[in-house]
Amino acid sequence: MKDWSAEFVARASGARLVSGAPAREGPRRAAIDSRAVAPGELFVGLRGERADGGAHAPQALGAGAWGVLVSPEHSRAAAERAGEAVVLEHEAPLAAMQALARAWRRALGGGGAKVIAVTGSTGKTSTKDILVALLERERRTRSSPENFNTEVGLPLAVLAAPADTEVLVLEMAMRGADQIAELTAIAEPDVGVIVNVGAAHLELLGSLEAIAAAKAELIAGLAPGSTAVVPAHDALLAPHLRADVRTIAFGDGGDVRLSERRADGEVVIAAGGHEIVLEPSFGAGHRLPAHQLQNLLAAVAAAGAIGIEPAGSLEVELSAMRGQRVELPGGAVVINDCYNANPMSVRAAIDELAEVARARRVAVLGDMLELGASSPELHREIGRHAVQRGVDVLVTVGPLAAHIGETFTGEAHAVADADAAAATLAALVRPDDTVLVKGSRGVALERVAEALTRDREPDTTPAGSRVR
């Protein structure tokens, strides 16, 4: 945004220019934390549940912010401290930041940038990471970092993209109805990817059909002529497909599907009547687990939608706590997949554990949250799946996860919290064990993974990512 004037930034955001030279060049990006704002950034004072960030505008200006965007009750105090900095005023700073992000999205790459939006009940972050690795060899590609996938994070990710960006990959999360629609209206994607639909947020949405409808807000928000990338033969999404939007299906029987797995780790993907050969450098022993293969197919489909056909080696660095593999002295391996959990993602993680373990399979599973009245039975189903996939030892963490143990027939330990789990595992783990750590964020199982791997270096061939 540096090429934009302060006056243009005001118009694009719908804000009023209270102070500062109208012709002053624009900011580098936007920020919402006054404690971390950097010189040249636009500080946006957002109202929270407990505090109004606009009250901290003077501190942001003192740190060298390009300017501030605040509600009217804070603009006067900010103007008194602004000096040559810009003060913008809007009754709803978040809406103004979102409008500014939409305007910047339209300006990226001289107005020709492509935006790919990715959502799904599980695997959306990994799919985003894989897609970026596929694209960045041929196009100037940027993506939303870590958790910048909400009504606050997504516009921040857009505003951080350099002006010469050719492809912007944005992750979209949701907690209920209308949220994907809001994000889609900001991002105006050319390609919308729905990785899958599963039993996440059942407590809020009530049914798989309602979850599918919420995810399909992405399809509904696409402009005619855009592309939707969806799982093949997904009955939940079928009612939401549009005749005026191109659909690319991935997976078995789809337009983009696995043709062959080769012994050397290569995968052959059938796409559009021809074959793509890729050599993924992530996965245990360079063999992709089933869920990561689906993520790869979705990413290949999305790349093809904007005219990019990848080939050759594929090196991916997945986001933190999403399957990182750490080898301990003595040979035990920890699979750190504790970023979040729902029934679909936990089953996939157990499948991966079953595929890659060299000896005992140890599963440390925490509560799966936001599942509503079905929660106890959904947890019991995980116990049955663990038995089917040959899990040897189970450690459940939390009162909901204890239901997993009710249907598990092997060695089981039930503990109250992450610290107790770490203490249990300290005496439990043997050389050559493979330990999966998986649970919802509220259970904080990263403390278990950290305790097991403290002061250890990651293995260079992780199950879920290549750490570099």
Image (cartoon, rainbow, N blue to C red):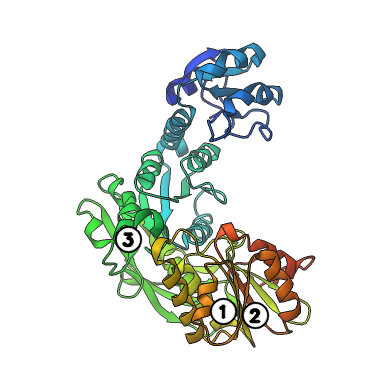
Q: Nearer the viewer, mark 2 or mark 3?
A: 3
Q: Nearer the viewer, mark 3 or mark 1?
A: 3
The disc labelled 1 sits on which kind of residue?
Leu
Image x and y of residue 369, in percent = 49, 60
The disc labelled 2 sits on which kind of residue?
Thr
The tag on residue 353 is 1
The disc labelled 3 sits on which kind of residue?
Ser
Q: Is residue 60 at all visible to an observer of this figure?
A: yes
SS at mark 1 in the image: helix
Image x and y of residue 430, in percent = 73, 84
User: Are there few (<14), some (14-19), or many (20+) residues within 10 Å of tag 2?
Assistant: many
- First in residue order: circle 3 vs circle 1: 3
Judge by depth and name the residue closer to the eye, 215 or 53: 53
Q: Which residue is mark 3?
A: 207
- For image coordinates 54% across by 34% down, the residue present is 48
Q: Is residue 44 at all visible to an observer of this figure?
A: no
Q: Which residue is mark 2?
A: 434
Judge by depth and name the residue closer to the eye, 157 or 114: 157
User: Are there few (<14), some (14-19), or many (20+) residues within 10 Å of tag 3?
Assistant: some
User: Are there few (<14), some (14-19), or many (20+) residues within 10 Å of tag 1?
Assistant: many
Asked if disc 2 and disc 3 are in contact, CB closer than 8 Å, the reply is no
SS at mark 2 in the image: strand
Asked if disc 1 and disc 2 are in contact, CB closer than 8 Å, the reply is yes
- For image coordinates 61% across by 14% down, the residue present is 77
- First in residue order: circle 1 vs circle 2: 1
SS at mark 3 in the image: loop
